[in-house]
Image (spheres, grey):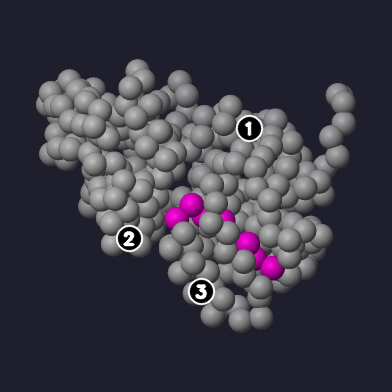
Amino acid sequence: MLKQEIEDGERGLADPQFRADVLAGLERRPRAIPARWFYDRRGSELFEDITELPEYYPTRTERAILEQACPEVAQIAGTGRAIVEFGSGSSVKTPILLDAVAPSAYVPIDISGDFLRESSRTLSRQFPDLLVLPFEADFMKPLTLPRTIADAKKLGFFPGSTIGNMIPLMAVDLLRTMRTSLGEGAMLLIGMDRIKDEATLVRAYDDAAGVTAAFNMNLLERINRELAGTIPLDAFRHRAIWNDDRARVEMHLEAVRDTGFTIDQREFSMTAGETIHTENSHKYGTRDARILLRSGGWTPIDMWTDPDDRFALYLAEAQAERPAP
């Protein structure tokens, strides 16, 4: 895929939405580029490396919770549902759920097509009797799921606290989009990270080995490769901060000196200390999480957490909507 991306970039065949989001994001103030554009092939690989870092507690904590919770999820949701995973990545946590609920089909959805197909082939070898239907798409938009599972009861799977990457307004919109895609009566198993001490949170997004920094900087490399950019990489550094007012960790690309560059033949300049905001990771308390789910059209059914209450897993249902109360 990397070779193809290079060739496409040289021929001006970059994703039109990527081009539009980058140009609009650099023209606005403060500058910001949507985090979904991290995930080209290299970005997806780097993120998988991040999940194995000692500082990055969410993945191993959620995996332990899933081991505990999935048998109970199967009892509540029943077996035979079609599992639809939003932003599946490498699907490393998915086998825990598949083993427990014995699904009729598995639909992984991801924006990185080649990475999606590779992980789907791996999962198919692990579960040879399971119907695996990889779906390359942007799950932020309403989806028409494969006809094969149209009549099946569905269980959405959204692990990793990915919901935290969205500002609350967008998170509610996404939850409502998921509800529409999965249908009334569907269930959703979703991970959410908890609020905790600032040092632990910042370390998780600014590791000693510099993997998260490389993940962040890869966005600039992608812009240069696919959008004929001339961004000097040595003019930027990775920065992670805790924004207590908004209960989120923010990732930025900070200019370390005054610099100028072009993207798609448009000129940009930045002064030292100015940043490009690239990602948020919102953290949720117990009440916050339940309010968020209900705002998105999902009724919380059950919740599991680790002994230190660092991370939580929620099971919610798309029940028939009714007027208040």
Where is residue 21, by image quadrant? top left
Q: Quadrant of the C terminus?
A: top right
Closer-to-camera residue (200/122): 122
> Any mark on residue 4, and which?
2
Measure how far apart labels 1 and 2 are at the Cα level. Answer: 35 Å
Question: Magenta part of the protein: which range?
Answer: 105-112
Quick one: 52 or 200, which is closer to the camera?
A: 52
Foreground: disc 1 or disc 3: 3
* Residue placed under numbered mark 3 in the picture: 121
The type of residue carrying mark 2 is: Gln
Asked if residue 187 lies in the magenta stretch, the reply is no
Q: What's the distance in space between the residues labelled 1 and 3, CA to CA?
A: 32 Å
Q: Is residue 109 magenta?
A: yes
- Residue 9 in sight from this viewpoint: yes
Residue 66 higher or lower than 104, as above or below:
above
Horizontal relation, residue 233 to residue 142: left or right:
left
Which residue is rendered at x = 15% and y = 27% of the image? 260
Residue 301 visible at all: no
Mark 1 closeness class: few <14, some 14–19, many ≥20 residues within 10 Å = many
Q: In this rendering, is residue 95 above or below 212? A: below
**Mark 1 / mark 2, whichever is N-terminal:** 2
Q: Amino acid at mark 1?
A: Val
Q: Quadrant of residue 75?
A: bottom right
Reading the image, the residue beneath label 1 is 172
Lower sequence index among marks 2 and 3: 2
Q: Secondary structure at mark 3?
A: helix
